[in-house]
Amino acid sequence: MSKEQSVPRDFVVGGELKVRRLGFGAMRITGQHIWGPPKDRNAARALVQRVVELGLNFIDTADAYGPGASEEIIAEALHPYPVGVVIATKGGLLRPRPQAWESDARPEALRRALDASLKRLKLDYIDLYQLHSPDPRVPFEDSVGALADARKAGKIRHVGLSNVGVRHLEAARAIVPIATVQNRYSLSDRSSEKVLSACEGAKIGFIPWYPLASGELARPGGPLDRVAKELKATPSQVALAWLLKRSPVMLPIPGTASLAHLEENARADALSLTQEQFDTLGKA
């Protein structure tokens, strides 16, 4: 592995929560289609415990995952939480049935969702609470204002946003400090470049969801496959290493229900891409 340039391993969320930049997304520890509990609850708990054993101290979830099941399993696995573990969750989406996602970011709905998450996670406050998505039926400022009020009440330590544009970020920052933004971003989908740039300028953490999407880049003989072979790594590890090198505010949260994949992903920040490898992937 090349040691051409070191990449920061940690990031301080909101100026006070030090996390390893490579985290864990807990969406897939639920049942099929992110609905209901997993078939093997003991295995899911063991997976979450292994996350912490591997030194990944940033765990991202949402009340919509299950719904509720992901948060419950995290609490079952880790409560009382080890010192330094940061739990992030989200509210603002409903799951009326499998494969259905519906916005509800009314202030009263967000207050109920937050209280339910606190109960499931067995916490007095949430380290990072994110608006899961803007609700087109609700003024964005009203939704963010509800989270600002919850922060003042001590139920939220830091506020984050998800699935937003630069204008959303600017509007929210006029109401409350924003610690993170979580948007879709990967080697194959960089549509949130402007949001990432805004986060870099403000030193706001950027959490890319679906970070392992690589499309045609991962085809046999393709750029991702070639770089992986050069580094004696897997394409997934290289995709994560590329994200970590892409920006110091990048906080990938690859998710999995597989212990083998978890352990594979956890080794990604030990990879060091050369500038040539990084550029090759970035231009592909």
Image: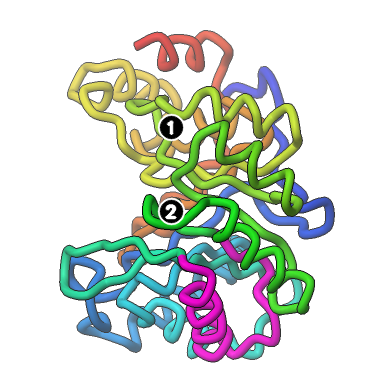
Looking at the image, is mark 2 or mark 1 earlier in the sequence?
Answer: 2
Residue pictured at 32% horizontal, 70% vertical = 94
- Mark 2 or 1: the one toward you: 2
- Disc 2 is placed on an element classified as loop
Return the residue nearer the eye: 50 or 151: 151
- Residue extent of the magenta highlight: 106-130
Q: Position of residue 80 (x, y in %)?
A: 65, 90
Q: In the rendered view, how is the structure colored?
A: rainbow
Label 1: which residue? 238
Amino acid type at circle 1 is Val
Q: Is residue 39 magenta?
A: no
Return the residue nearer the eye: 103 or 73: 103
Residue pictured at 59% horizontal, 90% vertical = 122
Please state if 57 lies on the left or on the right of 192 as rendered. Answer: right
Return the residue nearer the eye: 266 or 209: 209
Please state if 3 lies on the left or on the right of 267 as rendered. Answer: right
Label 2: which residue? 133
Within-10-Å neighbours for mark 1: few <14, some 14–19, many 20+: many
Q: Position of residue 25 (x, y in %)?
A: 45, 59
Q: Position of residue 139 (x, y in %)?
A: 50, 53
Would you identify the image quadrant in which residue 125 lies? bottom right
Would you identify the image quadrant in which residue 33 lies? bottom left
Q: Position of residue 77 (x, y in %)?
A: 50, 85
The span from disc 2 to disc 1 (Cα, nearest Å) is 29 Å
Position of residue 230 relative to residue 204, above or below, is above
Return the residue nearer the eye: 91 or 30: 91
Position of residue 58 relative to residue 152, above or below, is above
Tell me the quarter of the image containing the C terminus. top left
Residue pictured at 64% horizontal, 86% vertical = 123
Please state if 255 lies on the left or on the right of 85 as rendered. Answer: left
Amino acid type at circle 2 is Ser
